[in-house]
Image (cartoon, rainbow, N blue to C red):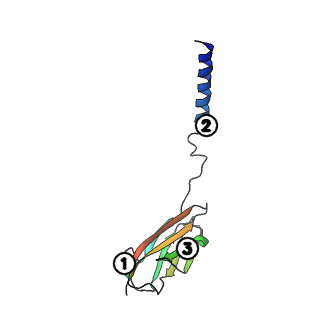
Amino acid sequence: MKPTHYLCLLGLMLITNNSWAYGGGSSSTKACAKPKFSEFVPAENTEVASGSAFSFIASSNTHPESIKVTAKGLTTAITVTPQNAGSSFKVSGTLPEALKGTYARIAIDASAQNNCPGAGGWLIKIAE
């Protein structure tokens, strides 16, 4: 082999070795753990009266101050209560009286303790 072949081979080995250093990385990067929402009351697609109460559970990694709830775009006042120490949060509120005879999505926006945003919600029918 010619000396130039050895140099090319050495260069390829160095490039390959460096590229392996940037692979994987799953052990050094932290995944985004989004907040989760469950136990929606009233249940999805249920018909309720205007001004009815609603509630849901937010996962333990949720920043309670970051939880925002809207019903068909209208901001809704909520109460956040810790369930158990280090556990989840119960979020409750009432639907706006202005919503009547329509479907409304109760939309939830919040961020987790690692500043990872999350969203959720469910659809209900509001009676006349």
Q: Secondary structure at mark 3?
A: strand
User: Mark 2 vs mark 1: which is more N-terminal?
Assistant: 2
In the picture, which quadrant includes the C terminus? bottom left
Can residue 70 be seen in this snapshot? yes
In the rendered image, which quarter is residue 50 located in?
Answer: bottom left
Q: Closest to the observer: 87 or 35?
A: 35
Q: Hey, what amino acid is under mark 3? A: Lys
Mark 3 vs 2: CB contact within 8 A? no
Q: Which residue is mark 3?
A: 68
Numbered mark located on residue 65 in the image: none
How would you rate the neighbour count of disc 1 (Cα within 10 Å): few for under 14, some for 14-19, many for 20 or more?
few
How would you rate the neighbour count of disc 3 (Cα within 10 Å): few for under 14, some for 14-19, many for 20 or more?
some
Residue 17 in the image, given as x and y percentages of width and height = 60, 31
Q: Secondary structure at mark 1?
A: loop
In the picture, which quadrant includes the N terminus? top right
Q: Which residue is mark 1?
A: 46
How would you rate the neighbour count of disc 2 (Cα within 10 Å): few for under 14, some for 14-19, many for 20 or more?
few
Q: Is residue 35 above or below residue 28?
A: below
Can residue 87 be seen in this snapshot? no
Residue occupying the point 55% across, 58% down: 33
Q: Hey, what amino acid is under mark 1? A: Thr
Q: Closest to the observer: 35 or 68?
A: 68
The residues bearing labels 1 and 3 have C-alpha atoms spaced at a distance of 22 Å
Q: Which residue is mark 2?
A: 21
Residue occupying the point 58% across, 35% down: 20
Residue occupying the point 60% across, 68% down: 63
- Left/right placement of residue 24 relative to residue 95 reads right
Q: Hey, what amino acid is under mark 2? A: Ala
Q: Secondary structure at mark 2?
A: helix
